[in-house]
Amino acid sequence: MNAAIDTSSPAIPAEKITLTASDGYPLTAYRYPARGEAKGNLLVAGGTGVPQRFYRRFAEYAAQRGLNVLTLDYRGASESRPASLKGFEMSYLDWSQKDLAAAVALLAQEQLPLYWVGHSFGGHAIGLLPNHHQLTACYTFGTGAGWAGWMPTGEALKIRLFWHVIMPAIVSWKGYMAWSLLGMGDDLPLGVYRDWKRWCGFPHYYFDDPSMAWVKPLYASVQVPCAFVTATDDPWAPPRSRDAFAKAYSNAAKMIADISPAPGHQPIGHMGYFRRESHAFWDQALDWLLQQPVAAVTPQTG
């Protein structure tokens, strides 16, 4: 669920490219070249329904700190959506297994460390990547299990109303998750709606879904260092929701941290990690990533 999303034009031109997913689906992505000699490549894995342009300021900032940055819109969303979402077929899992996997494969072709910054869904996706072993380290903001029971009482009531009353009516009318009508984010395909709604009904997301038992060993196989950072005032992914999900990365070297709004400053919430005034959070993330051990990097092809 999203608050207001910045849609202003980029202040620094970025290279727009077509990224081909592993099944051939064309995705729109943007490259932000590093200032000076590149210290590594960075992939930004955004949240559900959050367009890549929302992360533009962070991408530019990371590029100024010496990283080549890639952002993308997942299939069916924003600049990677088809002419019509009605009748468009896909699985929510495609974003991890096909779209982000292709971005990792592209960046891994270069002989540089490969870092990951995820927001919300971007922290889910790591464990579903077929090529997560190519990552050097991952840092995520606001990743949680999605269950309303982890949320503050008032927020939980609103989310249950959203999933069980408001959105079913909108989906029945439009044929897809047209939550732009509510000002909450970019419209999403029907398959994303169905999967997301079902998994948010479980305390531990899809790890509690009997049909998804196969995902547990995938998450257990992740061994790259992973940081899971969430705001104490994040209404959709509070710390206990984060903990309920992050424990699935049972064999990763994890760093778990909470952050709080500074006195006199506006709330962080679920989207404030990437506001223009959040440079301190960005520096913490980039510093942590760049401090992680780098194994011998060999270009990957094919």
Image (cartoon, helix red, strand yellow):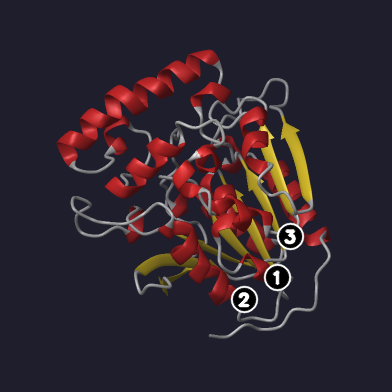
Residue of label 1: 40
Pointers 2 and 1 in contact (C-beta within 8 Å): no
- Amino acid type shown at disc 1: Gly
> Residue 9's x, y, as percent?
42, 53
At a point 15% along the width and 35% down the height, the residue shown is 173
Kindly report the distance in space between the C-alpha atoms of the residues bearing marks 2 and 3: 17 Å
At a point 67% along the width and 66% down the height, the residue shown is 135
Q: Is residue 193 above or below residue 287?
A: above
Near mark 2 (Cα within 10 A), the count class, few <14, some 14-19 or many ≥20, is many
Mark 3 or 1, closer to the camera: 3
Near mark 3 (Cα within 10 A), the count class, few <14, some 14-19 or many ≥20, is some
Element on which disc 1 rests: strand
Image quadrant in which the N terminus is located: top left
Element on which disc 3 rests: loop
In which quadrant of the rendered view does residue 163 lie? top left
> Is residue 276 in view from this perspective?
no
In depth, the one of 2 and 196 nearer the eye is 196
Residue of label 2: 108
Q: Is residue 279 above or below residue 63?
A: above
Task: In the displayed orientation, state which residue is furthest to the left.
Answer: 173
Residue 214 - label: none
Residue 223 - label: 3
Mark 2 or 1, closer to the camera: 2
> Residue 187's x, y, as percent?
31, 44
Kindly report the distance in space between the C-alpha atoms of the residues bearing marks 2 and 1: 10 Å
